[in-house]
Amino acid sequence: MTPVSATRRVPTYCYQCVAGPDLLTVKVQGGVATEVEPNFCAAAVHPGGGKVCVKAFGLIQKTYNPNRVLTPMKRTNPRKGRKEDPGFVPISWDEALTLIADKLNAIRATGLTDESGYPRVAASFGGGGTPQSYMGTFPAFLAAWGAVDFGFGSGQGVKCYHSEHLYGEYWHRAFIVSADTPLCNYLISCGSNIEASGGVVGIWRHSRARARGMKRVQVEPHLSVTGACSAQWVPLKPKTDAAFLFALIHVMLHEAPRSALDLDFLARRTGSPYLVGPNGCFLRDRISRKPLVWDEASASACPHDTPGIREALEGGYEVDAIEIGADGDVLAEGLLLGQTAFTRMVQHMASYTPEWAASVCDVPVATIRQVADEYLAEACVGQTIEIDGKTLPFRPVAVTLGKTVNNGWGGYECCWARTVLATLVGALEVPGGTIGTTVRLARPMSQRLESARPGADGFMHFALNPTDKEHWSARPNIRNAYRTLVPLASDGPWSQALGPTHFSWMFLDATPTGLPRVTFPDLWFVYRTNPAISFWETGALADKMARFPFVVAFAYTQDETNHFADVLLPDAVDLESLQLIRIGGTKYVEQFWDHQGFALRQPVVAPRGEARDFTEVATELAARTGLTEGYVRAINKGAGGVPLKGAHADFSLPTDRAPERDAVWDAICRAASSELSDGAEQHGLDWWKEHGLATRPFPRSDWYLYPTMVERGLRFELPYQERLARVGIELGRRLHENGMHWWDEQLKEYQALPACKDFAAPWVAALEKDGGCGESHPFWLITARSMQYAWGGNVGMQMIKEVADNIAGHRGVIMNGSVAAELGIADGDAIEISTPRARITGRAVLRQGIRPDTLLAIGQFGHWATPLAKDFGVPNMNALTTMRMELTDATGSGADLVRVKLQRLKEIA
């Protein structure tokens, strides 16, 4: 046994944000964690060379933060409100668990769902799924419990890369879309702030790419750190990215020669040659009902998958066919004129000229044509590259989108345009081009290539939520109604959090016609999330939280959300608890590796105070609620991250008794070892504690979906969205049959070929509805990611603040220096930013690298309960943004955008 006084270096990981995990080593002296350093043993397998970001270096201070909650606590003040002192007092673990278990048992006795059909238990976890890497076997407890509402989000589902998640998985199995940075030569980045959001791997990869000659064009209203590191900055108006991208497509279709495009890719690997009938639906073979294409070899119409055909990419053809629309309605039959989907797109894009776009997005015509021409020139159409012995197309150009570009109104159009730009040159899912990194909605989850199963019409199968009369339901399974309203959200483990999560909050007071009355959950679990800061309309949200009957918060420090809790459970933080997770393969933005495997997070030091490991808490709750058997069964099935029964061995735990924590993770470690080594090794927990991680090679060719599409004879469902147009009509019929007309504006988004319009108009209309106008509120307030504070869990640490204060914008609101001079505002002056409904105050940070009509509030602050952070004096734009139906798009998302006015203050009150 190692003496307590000895110096040790303990391997573990940091997964505080979705750009992880970072693999690291912690130096421990005399039982105290003293330093964080890279895990140099992982340098050969980690795409960031084993390096870690500043958030990981903050883990020492996070562990020893004097403001931590270190004992279970209960509320003594029955009144809840922002200005009410909760009166938290320490209690024992036994009392805390008894309070929770008594509530849960009472709920179970009454029924898991209430009179409206909604789950009586709700749970919210932040950080884009990263809390699952810290919550041990708690998912197994929730699985054993049954119905749980995960729809009370903290921003996910409405403020994340939302349209990208849904349309990306639908079109090319890409929950997150990335450039193939190691091979890309030309990247158009529309608001994708990779230098702040990509973590160590993203920053390293992009710096290497730029050093070897990749040109990155940053398109956004302000000069972010990514823009500052780019070859070119294009400052366009907020929410006009779609116009810019549509104009690029126009240039490629109407100004460039056809030979500049990848015509073979378009004809063979997309739905471009499918014939579209007079009513906008595919023309189909009368017998097989398969979409028809025109075969140039036989000069006849054939089903799309007929062997040996040569599909016509352009033109109109008279064919004997049937046209079938929504709900299976026969729209036309007989000799019908059909145009190829590609021809329809060419006609559709004719009016979106660079001259038109320049008037919309305030980007010079010459710049638009320059970017389009460079993209085409760098596409290398016709070239190939060998990867893992496979000859693949080489198309080193890509387009990436950032938050607020790919969510809210215009998100669909931007995602469609980005993906069409890739298909035009054959750069979708091939080396150098636009690729996806993981799946979360398609099945099997996290197995991207396997999820590309054949579906209808030669495209990939995707389980849309039903819109047919037999299966659609006006009774949602959870409060945000994602299954009822959002077909693209599907119905998997991640779907609840990707619905319109703000509806769960909005509908508590005013449930729309046709839906069952939305009720408060009887019990709400909260972990690593702070919606009272990170969601819109923070004041109203806090008022609703105050009305939740019983809140259980796993707490690091006190914060704005757990201020309303009834019970606080001390969180055994990153360096104090135990968990094994999957690493490598393809995941998140730049996290596509040449290896895959597992990494262990282990107790580097003993938990401080009375903090308990999450697995121990989950096991105890399962025992006190009579769910031990189901809980262990869920662990055996893989709720701990790895199925315990695999092809080579069975490490299943007995279901008749509560397991010890280390026994659970020892079994999981052995199952992981067996899976990784095809049964050759069965290393237990002690081995993993020593080594920290284990991997095996991951084929680089598996980064790309293209070979799988070819192997399975599949096409990408682009450019013509015939299926979605039919689904939109069906959804409208179902809603109207139930008297639900409040979703009619959203139904207009279901277009086979999306139209570009003024996507900022809904926010102006919202301003006018509140009594303001564009003249009196001339500025757009937007936000941007802070790498230092990303995901908010480290906002109360001095070290992080010291680092962040050296980055422009972290001490106030950025505005254009010339505009500030006109208004008599100097750097550091107190300012007020307001809408007709709310106001925030802060300090002016003057920069020339921002449009005159734009203000920028980095991160999400405005804390009033979190220690240290409450003294920052930095405002939160969420206090000004509102949750509204009219600001919600068809997928249920919105955008961090608000129209405001600004004035100088003498001083902040």
Image (cartoon, rainbow, N blue to C red):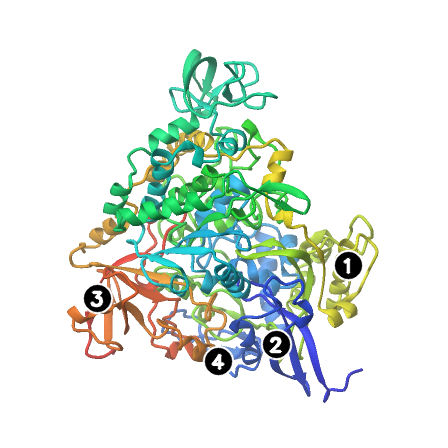
How far, Cα to Cα, is label 4 from label 2?
Answer: 16 Å
| Mark 1: amino acid | Ser
Residue under pointer 2: 37
Label 4 SS:
helix
How far, Cα to Cα, is label 1 from label 4?
Answer: 37 Å
Q: Residue 902 carries which label?
A: 3
| Mark 4: amino acid | Met
Residue under pointer 1: 673
Label 3 SS:
strand
Closer to us: mark 2 or mark 3?
Answer: 2
The answer, for residue 451, to whether it is visible in the render is no
Q: Which mark is residue 799?
A: 4
Q: Left of 650 or right of it: where is 212?
A: left
Quick one: label 4 or label 2, which is nearer the N terminus? 2
Q: Which mark is residue 507?
A: none
Q: Left of 241 or right of it: where is 432?
A: right
Within 10 Å of the Cα at label 4, are there few (<14), some (14-19), or many (20+) other Cα atoms?
Answer: some
The answer, for residue 652, to whether it is visible in the render is yes
Q: Mark 1–mark 2 contact, CB under 8 Å?
A: no
Label 2 SS:
strand
Q: Mark 4–mark 2 contact, CB under 8 Å?
A: no
Q: In which quarter of the image is the N terminus?
A: bottom right
Give coordinates of residue 892: x percent, y percent: 41, 46
